[in-house]
Amino acid sequence: MQKKELKQQIEEQTALIAELEKSFPKRDDTVDRWHENNRPYEIHHVKVRDAYWKRRMLITRLEEGAVSKTAAVY
């Protein structure tokens, strides 16, 4: 993959992260974190986490680093 494509994908992931961060569903603090009332919050949290991970991996590829070492951290 070329650097230009990687930079574009990083920008797309950054925009996605910003959009996801703004649209977190409300968390119901009256029940346990894993209660079904908090399921939309947890699903959204996983989407945000995965977007950050994908962005970090793209940055590692752009910097020509070891993707396996970065993956081990995450």
Image (cartoon, rainbow, N blue to C red):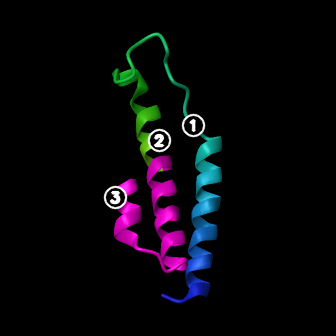
Secondary structure category for the residue under label 3: helix
The mark lying in front, picked from 2 and 3, is: 3
Marks 1 and 2: CB-CB under 8 Å?
yes
Secondary structure category for the residue under label 1: loop
Residue 50 location, x and y as percent?
44, 53
Residue 12 colored magenta? no
Q: Which residue is mark 2?
A: 44
Residue 67 colored magenta? yes
Mark 2 and mark 3 lie on one chain; the one further toward the N terminus is 2
Q: Nearer the viewer, residue 60 or 51?
A: 60
Q: Which mark is residue 72?
A: 3
Secondary structure predominantly adopted by residues drawn in magenta: helix
Residue 9 location, x and y as percent?
56, 73
Q: Callout 1: few (<14), some (14-19), or many (20+) C-alpha neighbours within 10 Å? A: some
Q: Which residue is mark 1?
A: 24
Q: CA distance from mark 1 to mark 3?
A: 27 Å
Q: Residue furthest top?
A: 30
Mark 1 and mark 2 lie on one chain; the one further toward the N terminus is 1
Marks 1 and 3: CB-CB under 8 Å?
no
Q: Residue at x 59, y 70 (%)?
A: 10
Q: Nearer the viewer, residue 38 or 11?
A: 11
